[in-house]
Image (cartoon, rainbow, N blue to C red):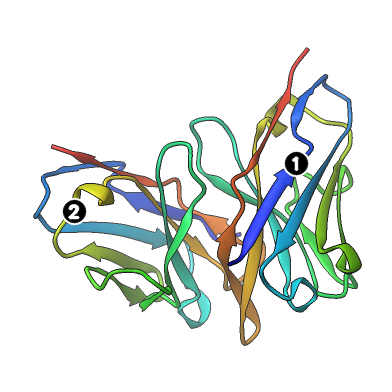
Amino acid sequence: EVQLVESGGGLVQPGGSLRLSCAASGFTFSGYWMSWVRQAPGKGLEWVANIKQDGSEFSYVDSVRGRFTISRDNAKNSLHLQMNSLRAEDTAVYYCVREKVVTISSYFDYWGQGALVTVSS
Amino acid sequence: EIVLTQSPGTLSLSPGERATLSCRASQSVSSSYLAWYQQKPGQAPRLLIYGASSRATGIPDRFSGSGSGTDFTLTISRLEPEDFAVYSCQQYGSSPYTFGQGTKLEIK
């Protein structure tokens, strides 16, 4: 059974940093692209970043580029999101998501339960 | 970036009725790379449909997707009580991946 379990969420002040982690199990983690998707309270879903199987390629949404860093450790089946210079608008539930590749693109087939990040003074 | 607009914002129906949800893209979605997700309160989204019309594993056949280009539809043929939730469309044909704002399907 595919499982994705996020950790590391919490309350942080504006300008602060937080590191999210996702523990993956039930599948060959090193064989999949992985993403982070967030959802602000009462709002829709927003893709944040993704990373290739071997960590050699990654992409970010414009609003977090230069502040967030996605990384992975295939030996430990873990995905990470380092979030710096946090803003109030980064407040959201952050989901760890597995990507299912279809030719040149991919959709999201498994989601974790999410980690709440609150940026507030 | 491709903007997805879902309509209606809220749909009020009764169990047993047919639900039709719309997702319109600001530009053509390449290769019908369009997915639909269901989300219940306090839960993560669940994949229903990918490739505009292919059901994900374990999804009942009362759920169907159709469309191409800029207009896509999710249809639930006969609503069950567990189907009342928020439904979101997503395009994965071009970066950045984008989602619609969601349609809330509520019990009438």
Q: Name the residue under label 2.
A: B80
Label 2, label 1: how far apart the Cα atoms are: 34 Å
| Residue at the image position 65 percent from the left and 83 percent from the top | A104
Q: Which of A70/B33 is in front? A: A70
| Residue drawn at x 87%, y 68% as measured from the top left | A74
Tag 2–tag 1 contact (CB < 8 Å): no
Q: Is residue A2 left or right of residue A42?
A: right
Which residue is outermost to the top?
A: A121
- With A27 as the anchor, is A111 left or right in this view? left
Residue B52 is left or right of residue A96, and the answer is left
Q: Which amino acid does label 2 sit on?
A: Glu
Q: Residue B12 appears at what percent x and percent y? A: 17, 41
The residue located at (79%, 37%) in the rendering is: A8
Location of residue A97 in the rendering, given as x and y in whole percent from the top left corner: 64, 59
Task: Tell me if residue B32 comes above or below residue B83 in the rendering.
Answer: below
Q: In which quarter of the image is the N terminus of chain A?
A: bottom right
Q: What residue type is labelled 1?
A: Ser
Q: Which of A111 and B26 is in front in this view?
A: A111
Disc 1 designates what residue? A7
Chain ID, mark 1: A
Q: Residue at point 61% right, 59% down?
A: B1
Mark 2, secondary structure of its residue? loop
Picture quadrant of residue B94: bottom right
Which image quadrant for residue B52? bottom left
Expressed as whole percent of the image width and height from the top left, the position of residue B101 reads 45, 45
